[in-house]
Image (spheres, helix red, strand yellow):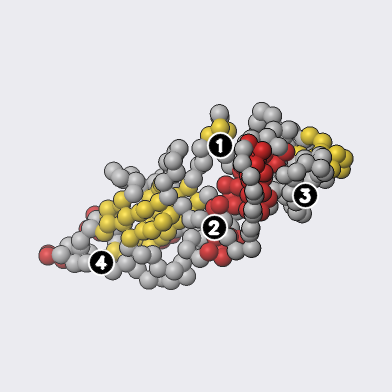
Amino acid sequence: VPGVAAATIGAGAKNLTSTLSSFGATFAKLSDETDQPNVPFATRYSPAGAPNVSRVPAEQDVPWAHWIEAGVSGVGVYPGGAGQLKGFWKPTYKCVMDSARDFCPPCREAIVLAIYRLVDPIDSVSPAPFPYASSQNILLEVESNENYKPIVFTLETLEPKRHKLEIEWFVLPEAQAPKSPGVAQDAALRAKGSPLPPIDAKPHRTRDEHRLELHPNQMEPGRWRVICRVRDETPKDGRDPWVLQDKHGLLQSERAWWLEIPPRK
């Protein structure tokens, strides 16, 4: 990752905590949560807007307020942080950023979102979609008797180890098609984040969620928008997902195509 670096030396549980805390600080911009300036692994890293340290103690004003509102066990507002005993507050007493072995829920959420600023849950699709600003249609192939060949859309996604991604296909008349911003293939756009507009229609049924087959001869004439959306709901820790709040829509991506069905003779 450009502009990010972390290094640790040694072995054992203490060094593992140091490694993880350094990773959290450099990769996800997490703050040191210790309240002891002489702790060896403390990064002294407390960037403005850090998701895991606050300068105010009000529950509704801390960056992890949505975790408190959700009633997640152990998450609250605790004194100390950024190597200071006073003037800073943190989400828990049990976090890698404060000498524990695991990341607390708000820190873990920040790391997952940082990953998805760089990684698209959609690896590839076929046929290749046109740019979102383009009005170009998929070319229909003619069979005998003026019938059209089926159009087959295929999808490859990330494969999380512990859970599956949510995949939905939509086939919408032009009038119902959302004005999608097209987050996906441009890395700069993905890093910025842009939530996808909601789709009220029900997803199109498919036998294989990684494959959609459309038969133009069975569709009404007109212009159609074919949309594939993929979302990572993230694994659950008990009843709570790893990400509770995704303001920028980083966990979701889509590809879309225009399809023109000509009038029947």
Q: Can residue 13 be seen in this view?
A: yes
- Quarter the N terminus occupies: bottom right
Looking at marks 1 and 4 on the same chain, the residue that comes earlier in the sequence is marked by 4
Identify which amino acid the numbered label 2 is placed on: Leu
| Residue in front for this viewpoint, 11 or 78 | 11
Q: Mark 4 points at which residue?
A: 140
Secondary structure under the numbered disc 1 in the rendered image = strand
- Write down the residue under mark 2: 118
Q: Residues under labels 3 and 2: Cα distance? A: 26 Å
Element assignment for label 2: loop
* SS label for mark 3: loop
- Report the disc number at residue 241: 1
Asked which secondary structure carries label 4, the reply is loop
Whichever of labels 4 and 3 marks the residue nearer the N terminus, that label is: 3
Does 186 sit above or below residue 47?
below
Residue 66 in the image: above or below residue 43: above
Q: Is residue 208 left or right of residue 44?
A: left
Q: Nearer the viewer, mark 3 or mark 2?
A: 3
Report x, y in % for residue 8: 65, 49
